[in-house]
Amino acid sequence: MEREELHRRIDLLQNKLKEGKIKFAPHLIDGFWESMKKVRVLSDGMVDPDTVDGRVRSLCMFIAYEDDRQEWKDAVSLREIQEGYFQRVNYAFGQLFEMMTESNADPYKFAGWFSSEDSRVKDCLPVIDAFLEEIKEFWENISDPTWIHLEDSFDSKAVFTGELFPDGRSNVTSSTGLYFDTTILPDPFLKISPMIQFMVDAEKCYEIVRLALQVLSYKSLAIIDIEKPIIAILPDRHNLEDEYRKFVNDCAITDSIEHTKTLFDQDISDGEELLAYYSHFSDADEVVSRLKKPEKLVFATEWDGTLAEQMMRLLEEQGTKLGMKKAGQAVYLHLISRFSQANDAFQRSLQLRGTPIIRAETSWIWYNQMLEYNAGNSDADSLNDLHIARALNSTVKNEMPWMGNIPPDALIEIRQAGAMDEIRHLLSSGLKSLIEANSNNFYRTGDQVFENLDVAFKEHEQKIKELTSKRWTFAGKDIGSFVVVGGIEITAALTGLPLYGALGAMAGMTGAIPNVKDLKEQYKKLKAEDSEINSTGVGILLKNKSV
């Protein structure tokens, strides 16, 4: 350690001691002060390193670590970082995002159209190259404080992983935003940068434009001024830290060795032997014929064809780009890639104290296989969150379409109303016993989450029906269905029409058109009960339910 840094740490320690911010266990305090009495300062005003023993150095290191982290957080807020990131994406691609929004297209269709014209691709490539350089430089400068902010946050966190970025046809926070305070999304531009060199110009244009449009769809959620951010973009450490990349690769090799034992009943000792084993398979049919458990070798759940045909497809699409020509080498590449992704997802979530969100079915399968080979690394609470996250992105998504379409303003309203606790309770109710019975049975826990929601909504809808059935009248007419006119809309589900439209239709049929003054008087009598229902978490969700 440099002498100047040691001196700085000693100063930090002394300041913390003066401020009374360090407490010692009774049996340690005497030894600490004996060590501190030995510390000397030389004639140049700097501490003498030879007088600082291991006890003091260890404490200094911990204090400096915490102090440096706090300095980073004080220097730049997470919201400022997010604003800086989205400003850069918006500067390069904001006009395209506006065009996509106006045309009511999704990122895939718009990016496909945009990259179909050679002249547009040619004009866009310099913008893309400059943008990718800017984003890389941005994260190199600001990655540490971004990670520190999110690591030190005690909020509940969903960590999206398994794909470059969430699917552009839906908003991942429609489900994660209900149970987790913050959903952490990866910056897709750093993630895709190693693959850019293998893309032709049109493909490069398509991928970057598509990802930029997907990123910008989260801008409003990321920079909204609320206490706990709904969205945060965080760079991967893979492309910024060599040691982390090596660590993840070593984990992937270990898991691949275990998986090879499962697939072929073949014992492998190290990474070199692993590559050599797969390299001796030239033919896909030969690989398949040797498999003991072919169901454990999954390439892509959406692919058709036999296992051998899928293997050759992988070789053609990915292997040849990396100089691999044999079917066995493609399998090796697939194992390393998939287990690297799974271990990165696990480590990323672990470091952030968050729950991994994996929506891609193939990624989910490989993540579970990684967990099997690393059993015991997840505690009960994190496993409970993982089950809920999986249920929200599978069973609920299929059974209750509204769950995947909660608009951003509804998520913000839930936060502002303080309704998160209610929602989290009903989502997790009854899951603990199921998880303890079978920690891998995500199907049953998905059903339990759906049942909890279904029961809650039925009870809540009954309360609304009770409120609207009150026999208050106006001009001789029942105005139960007018309960929210001039106020908060409960739901169009009760009438099949938006409530302002329902009011107009009923008034037209009866010939009674209430004036605003009298209607507001009646409304005041209902508002208290109405607000009690609508301010609950379930009420806000039901209000925004698609019908």
Image (tube, helix red, strand yellow):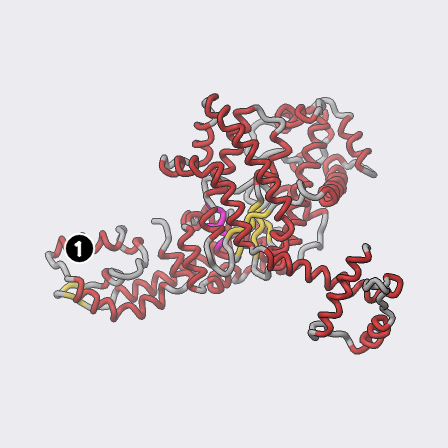
403 displayed left or right of 137: left
Instruction: Name the residue rendered at 64%, 59% in the picture.
Output: 71
Residue annotated with mark 1: 506
Task: Quadrant for residue 460, please give it.
Answer: bottom left
Q: How far across and down, in percent of the image, does residue 528 sit?
A: 31, 70
Q: How far across and down, in percent of the image, does residue 233 sit?
A: 55, 48
Q: Residue furthest front?
A: 43
Q: Does residue 104 belong to the magenta stretch?
A: no
55 displayed left or right of 150: right
Question: Overall secondary structure of the magenta stretch?
Answer: helix
Task: Quadrant for residue 26, please give it.
Answer: bottom right
Which amino acid, mark 1? Met
Q: Does residue 174 belong to the magenta stretch?
A: yes
Q: How far across and down, in percent of the image, does residue 16 sit?
A: 71, 70
Magenta region: 171-177
Instruction: Name the residue rendered at 70%, 75% in the picture.
Output: 20
Crowd tier of the residue under label 1, counting other residues whose Cα lies within 10 Å: few below 14, some 14–19, many 20 or above: some
For residue 59, above or below residue 102: below
Instruction: Name the residue rendered at 89%, 62% in the picture.
Output: 50
Whether residue 88 is visible, yes or no, is yes
Whether residue 383 is visible, yes or no, is no
For residue 95, above or below residue 226: above
Q: How far across and down, in percent of the image, does residue 15 sit?
A: 72, 70
Task: Quadrant for residue 156, please give it.
Answer: bottom right
Q: Secondary structure at mark 1?
A: helix
228 displayed left or right of 150: left
Instruction: Name the residue rendered at 59%, 48% in the picture.
Output: 234
Front-most of residues 77 and 103: 77
198 displayed left or right of 24: left
